């Protein structure tokens, strides 16, 4: 028996070998991590980026390629968890930022770009009014606060596997979640959700969900489920909030525009700010105009950087000049075709492995059968995602540790072919663990 076969006799052995290869290849990333341990808890300021034994440190990005501290190049299939849609150093966005810098960035006043950007966002996503924040988390906190203030209630219905920000994470119990009265229901299960709503009668301020759970594993909502939630929210007197922080990229008018559901409030974030810090919440005038400061009873919404000219300028250029409806459709088609090819390969190997998602967003799952909610993949062995992550890194593919991949505008045919080849190699090398 060869060394390799013996070492890979078990899944744990395969992971140990992959980790050892990773450690040996990345001394500069390790050194940076060790230095950071003294001043950042676990060397980390963004939990999702932690990797055991240490995360790679990226030094730079250009187009669709990242380069790490040790000089390795990676095809960027993470796309900054969807915020990096434009790729690195997009010239149109860069020019917009340069112009903004030339004009001074901390004006402490209404500026000449914010209303133009607001117009572009409203037109694109079917909103009557919008307000800007600095992150998707803040956008969702504001949307929930709005629902509570409008209804005079405190209850929030969310879904298991949902992610709405650092303070609103429903994948696992999080002691740092914001103190809302949250009830969790199973995604894509209208009967169970209706029962949960009935149990909360008179207490629900909002129902909040992603039209495709992103962090939860690229699990799309079924149209009938969304339509049922719309009716249920109306019957309960609660606001329906659609978190399109990730999914707004999946159709020119956001995923809601193709799923045929109109929420009371929509939240946005990620790429919509052109790669700068960004969030937004918006909807119909009747609800949003409660923030009109000319009203004696106006709701307050502050934020030093809400209208910062870097985000306003980059976002406006990104939405109107780069990620046009045509570019959005083309990227979605590229992603759909790639995901179909990856699933074909998994099927050809008879592997318990599939890629779920829509358009430019996808996640690998090591499970057979339909995946309609996170409970459907609860039995999958998490070590396979670990192995997939390290193996794809070794093939020069940058992705999320949880197996999420997002296309960005620079993702071309060659990059897609490289990802396909890396997945094929994974399927061949680890067939024994995938049955
Ligand atoms: N909502 C969804 C669906 C997200 O995926 C995220 C981030 O991943 C957020 C909200 C939070 O956005 P941010 O990280 O900008 O606070």
Image (cartoon, grey):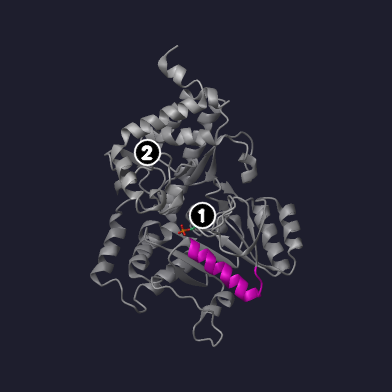
Q: Is residue 346 left or right of residue 307?
A: right
Mark 2 = which residue? 415
Label 1 – label 2 distance at C-alpha = 22 Å
Does 146 lie within the magenta span? yes
Q: Residues within 10 Å of mark 2 (few under 14, many from 20)?
A: some
Q: In the image, is the residue at mark 1 within 8 Å of ligand 1 by its beta carbon? A: yes
Outermost residue on the bottom side: it is 296
**Magenta stretch in the rendered image:** 137-154
Where does residue 14 sit, x and y in percent of width and height?
Answer: 46, 26
Which of the labelled discs sits on residue 247, or is there none? 1
Residue 178 in picture, x, y percent from top left: 56, 63
Total marks shown come to: 2
Closer to the camera, 130 or 279? Answer: 279
Residue 330 visible from this viewpoint: no
Quarter of the figure with residue 255: bottom right
Report crowding for label 1: few under 14, some 14 to 19, many 20 or more residues within 10 A (C-alpha). many
């Amino acid at each position: 028996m060869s060394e390799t076969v013996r070492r890979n006799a078990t899944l744990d052995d395969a992971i140990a070998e992959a980790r050892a290869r990773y450690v040996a290849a990345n001394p500069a990333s390790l050194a940076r991590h060790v230095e950071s341990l003294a001043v950042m808890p676990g060397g980390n300021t963004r939990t999702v980026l932690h990797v055991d034994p240490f995360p790679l440190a990226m030094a730079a990005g250009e187009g669709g390629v990242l380069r790490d501290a040790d000089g390795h190049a990676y095809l960027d299939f993470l796309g900054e968890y969807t915020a990096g849609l434009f790729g690195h150093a997009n010239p149109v966005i860069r020019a917009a930022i340069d112009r903004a810098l030339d004009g001074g960035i901390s004006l402490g006043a209404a500026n000449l770009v914010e209303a133009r950007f607001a117009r572009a966002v409203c037109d694109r996503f079917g909103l009557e009014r919008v307000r800007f924040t600095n992150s998707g988390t803040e956008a969702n906190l504001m949307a929930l606060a709005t629902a509570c203030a409008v209804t005079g209630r405190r209850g929030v219905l969310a879904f298991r596997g949902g992610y709405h920000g650092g303070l609103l994470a429903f994948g696992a119990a999080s002691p740092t979640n914001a103190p809302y009265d949250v009830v969790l229901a199973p995604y894509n299960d209208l009967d169970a959700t209706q029962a949960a709503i009935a149990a909360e009668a008179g207490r629900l301020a909002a129902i909040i969900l992603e039209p495709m759970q992103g962090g939860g594993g690229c699990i799309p909502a079924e149209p009938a489920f969304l339509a049922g939630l719309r009716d249920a929210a109306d019957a309960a007197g609660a606001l329906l909030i659609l978190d399109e922080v990730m999914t707004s990229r999946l159709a020119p008018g956001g995923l809601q525009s193709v799923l045929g559901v109109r929420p009371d409030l929509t939240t946005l974030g990620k790429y919509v700010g052109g790669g700068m810090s960004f969030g937004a919440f918006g909807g119909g005038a009747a609800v949003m105009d409660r923030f009109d400061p000319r009203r004696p009873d106006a709701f307050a919404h502050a934020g030093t950087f809400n209208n910062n000219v870097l985000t306003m300028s980059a976002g406006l250029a990104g939405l109107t000049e780069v990620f046009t409806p045509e570019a959005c459709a083309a990227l979605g088609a590229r992603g759909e075709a790639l995901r179909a090819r990856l699933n074909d390969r998994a099927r050809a190997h008879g592997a318990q492995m599939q890629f779920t998602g829509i358009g430019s967003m996808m996640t690998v799952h090591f499970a057979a059968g339909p995946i309609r909610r996170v409970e459907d993949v609860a039995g999958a062995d998490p070590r396979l995602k670990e192995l997939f992550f390290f193996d794809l890194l070794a093939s020069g593919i940058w992705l999320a540790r949880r197996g999420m991949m997002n296309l960005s505008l620079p993702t071309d045919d060659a990059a897609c072919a490289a990802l396909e080849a890396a997945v094929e190699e994974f399927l061949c090398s680890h067939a024994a663990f995938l049955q």
